[in-house]
Amino acid sequence: MKLGLGLYRHQLNDDHYRFARQCGCTHIVAHLVDYFRSSRGNRPGDQPVGDHAGWGVAGDPDALWTYDELAGLKRDINAAGLQLEAIENFDPAHWHDVLLDGPQKQRQLENLKTIIRNLGRAGIPVMGYNFSVAGVAGRVKGPFARGGAEAVGMDGPCEVPMPHGMVWNMVYDTEAQPGVVPPTTPEQLWTRLAGFLEALLPVAEEAGVTLAAHPDDPPLPTIRGHARLVYQPQLHRKLLALRPSPANALEFCVGTVAEMAAGDVYEAVDEYSRAGKLAYVHLRNVRGKVPHYRETFIDDGDVDILRVLRILKSNNYNGVLIPDHAPQMTCSAPWHAGMAYALGFIRAGLQAIGN
Ligand SMILES: [Mn+2]
């Protein structure tokens, strides 16, 4: 198994690559969507939470991630002695009508194919995505973790309707008509996912890129009135069976699975790692389950992280682990301290199990 660090867009620079190296990482997972550009609720150096207005305005619909941009990113990361394992999350500006089944869907599917081809050409092996209408919405932030460290959690369901012009917790159209997006049913959502996989997987296979699905965080059947896909562990199985392919895999999020009201996190780790369907792993800890839970320090929640590592090792998982989120520690570099703590713990765990 390989230790990696996820970096937000504003962190894609030499200082953060050196920080990753110093923490013992060999791999980077890069976010190209900017969640911090225009939201009042999100601060750089934190993990995005936002409010009912979401994480702010999505990117430029006409500026697809180019080969030059992706190859340059990979070159810089390689020059720092690291590997670029994955790009995490499509920009809502590039695929809002794929998620919403809107009028630009066909054109946007072509855009996503272009992005996948560009990743393949640049030699980036994984594209992580989260096929979700409401996205990561409904969480709260507070001094929830040990010692009053700031962390996120959930204090009950979130069914505030979602306004037009918004999807995946970001605004893609600042001039959208008033009103709210009508609820999405599970049938509609699974049909949209099937169309997405049908269109993208052949291109991904040819490009040598794995599409890696993140489960719904928070994992509730609905948020803001919109159905969610993977909110129980066995729904990963349904997603993979929709169109079996080596390129159809998971961005497996241990923390999100632990938040799920049904199922067992260790059985889920075992099932999907045994099946070889983990493209990469988000590793974090949590206390409680939806709709009432708190993210915790990695050594402090309901999940026995060492047990997770042992299961992954026993199933010969040899991919990348990243810490996902971590509580913000009280110091002048809250994000860095939280990540360094999580990475140190995971690195010790990997050594302890003889990885
Ligand atoms: Mn995650």
Image (spheres, rainbow, N blue to C red):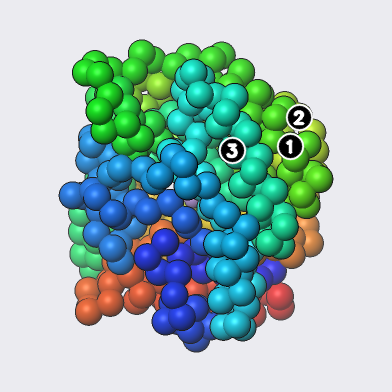
Left or right? Give the position of 345 relative to 167.
Answer: right
Q: Which of marks 2 and 3 is nearer the N terminus?
A: 3
Q: Quadrant of residue 165?
A: top left
Residue 11: % across, % down? 40, 69
Q: Residue furthest left?
A: 40
* Earlier residue among tags 1 and 2: 1
Helix, strand or loop at label 2? It is: loop
Q: Which of marks 1 and 3 is nearer the N terminus?
A: 3
Per the image, label 3 sits on a secondary structure element best described as helix
> Cβ of disc 2 within 8 Å of ligand 1?
no
Q: Distance between the residues labelled 1 and 3?
A: 14 Å
Q: Is residue 205 visible?
A: yes
Residue appearing at x 42%, y 81% in the figure: 15
Whole-number angstrom distance, CA of label 2 to CA of label 3: 21 Å
Q: Name the residue under label 1.
A: 201
Separation of residues labelled 1 and 2 (CA atoms): 8 Å
The residue wearing badge 3 is: 111
Q: Which amino acid does label 2 sit on?
A: Arg
Identify the residue shown where x is 69% and y is 35%.
Answer: 200
Which mark is drawn over residue 29? none
Q: What residue type is labelled 3?
A: Asn
Q: Residue 243 carries which label?
A: 2
Q: In this picture, is 69 found above or below 269? A: below
Tell which tag, 1 or 3, sits nearer the viewer.
3
Q: In which quarter of the image is residue 16?
A: bottom left
Q: Residues within 10 Å of mark 3 (few under 14, many from 20)?
A: some
Quadrant in which the C terminus is drawn? bottom right
